[in-house]
Amino acid sequence: MADAAGGQGWPRQADVPDDVAREILRRGEPDVLGRMPWSSNATYLVNLTAPDGSLLAVYKPQRGERPLWDFPRGTLALREVAAYEMSEALSWQFVPDTVMRDGPAGPGMMQRFVEHDPDEHYFTLLESHPDEFQRMAAFDVVINNTDRKGGHCLIDSDGHIWGVDHGVSFHAQWKVRTVIWDFANEPISPATREALTEALARMRGDVGKRMHELLDRFEVDAVRARIEHLLASGVLPEADPGYHSYPWPLV
Ligand SMILES: Nc1ncnc2c1ncn2[C@@H]1O[C@H](COP(=O)(O)OP(=O)(O)O)[C@@H](O)[C@H]1O
Ligand SMILES: [Mg+2]
């Protein structure tokens, strides 16, 4: 995708300033470029144009969500936005800017596209980025991610690690399914502890309010409970025996 984005006249995405990108993501006019390869839902790459420039984004209309037995219909897009809000509340910036808005196939989530090297993923990046992935392991506990595949971890040209595809997160029941079990039973770092404490405080204020607009009340309570549990145990959890703790395919 890096070549597709860079080679056809689009600006280098990392060069679009964050505040400009923020504005275009919310108000830009979408033009569908194609369907994302490897997507299981209707997931589109779109070009957004606004007076101050253009931006590539990933658009997932609620209408295109594949029905699942354990998540209510039409809620996956909201969960993607909640994951973004949580990543910001933790100051971890794992999730590209994500909003709910209207698009060519109706309301859905619109997420800033991260130009990345498609050959890189969790398994190629782990050794060189242990701190980021320990944090991501904690992040997936907080959001109760049921689908952290290796390919949902991206690295951009500035070396920043991103996580994408958080539609099947925030279930009230513990369901973590991930490839990131390398940190099981490891103590969380002091910086992670600090971020979790801060996020918990923000859950009582502005962040909590926004989460209630995106999730049901049991799901919001469960976010709080998982943060409290992580802080109390002080270590990252291990996979539950007998549960399908690994996603398929792994990448
Ligand atoms: N914000 C993004 N920036 C760049 N690539 C992305 C982004 N979101 C998804 N992708 C790419 O598109 C693929 C499919 O998107 P994904 O979110 O996994 O869709 P689905 O919900 O259909 O599984 C991902 O594996 C990833 O390679
Ligand atoms: Mg996916």
Image (cartoon, rainbow, N blue to C red):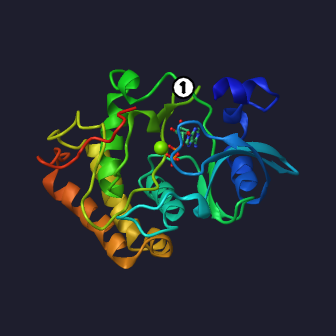
Q: How many marks?
A: 1
209 vs 144, left or right, is right
Which residue is nearer to you in this view: 240 or 139? 240
Q: Quadrant of residue 182?
A: top left
Residue type, numbered disc 1: Pro
Q: Which percent across, then down, holds residue 39?
A: 53, 43
- Say which residue label 1 marks: 118
Residue drawn at 37 percent across, 27 percent down:
129
Q: Which percent across, then down, holds residue 184?
A: 18, 39
Q: Which percent across, then down, holds residue 216?
A: 40, 76
Q: Residue furthest left?
A: 241
Q: Residue furthest bottom?
A: 217
Which residue is nearer to you in this view: 61 or 159? 61
Residue drawn at 36 percent across, 71 percent down:
220
Which residue is nearer to you in this view: 237 or 160? 237
Q: Quadrant of residue 173?
A: bottom left
Q: Which percent across, then down, holds residue 236?
A: 20, 45
Helix or strand or loop: what does disc 1 sit on? loop
Residue drawn at 71 percent across, 64 percent down:
102
